[in-house]
Amino acid sequence: MQVMSVNGIAADCTDGTRAETVDLSLVGDVPVGTWLLTHLGCARDVISEPEARQILAALEGLRALMAGGDLGTAFDDLERRAPTLPPHLQAALDAGHSTG
């Protein structure tokens, strides 16, 4: 969500379709215009605008899918890259381990 105004440890935010008051306790002071990753009314992290746009596109794609439509281009960023393993699993695979 994007910060529209700040009042102490709370901010009025929007995702473009809905407005919400968000608790800023976990992220501290932020200026108007900042993008936040939120969960249950709390700002969890400060994120970049491109990251926010990707998240909003993914959520819109999921809403469309749940309404009987298709994902469209919501996950193009994932479809364009090859799958990768987390570093610890890649290291195990590189060492020749094939099971946990």
Image: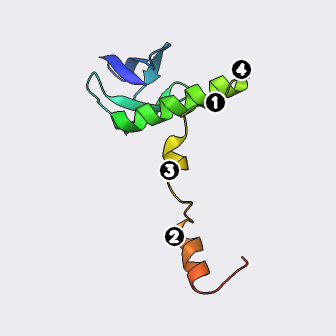
From this view, report whether residue 76 is shown above or below residue 91: above
| Residue pointed to by mark 2 | 87
Query: How far is disc 4 from disc 2 in space, using C-alphas?
Result: 37 Å
Which of the marked residues, 3 or 4, is nearer the chain's N terminus? 4
Residue placed most toward the observer, 4 or 11:
4
Q: Residue 26 location in percent, x, y?
A: 42, 36
Q: Earlier in the sequence, mark 1 or mark 2?
A: 1
* Residue drawn at point x = 25 percent, y = 26 percent: 31
Whole-number angstrom distance, CA of label 3 to CA of label 2: 20 Å
- The residue where tag 4 is placed is 67
* Residue type at tag 4: Ala
* Identity, as a three-letter code, of the amino acid under mark 3: Arg
Q: Determine which residue is flagged by label 3.
A: 80
Residue located at (54% from left, 34% from top): 74
Given the image, on which type of amino acid does mark 1 rest?
Answer: Leu
- Mark-to-mark CA distance, 1 and 4: 9 Å
Q: Name the front one of labels 3 and 2.
A: 3
- Along the viewing direction, whichever of 8 and 59 lies nearer the viewer: 59
Q: Please tell me whether mark 2 sits on a helix, a strand or a loop.
A: helix
Q: What is the CA distance from the residue labelled 1 to the residue labelled 2?
A: 29 Å
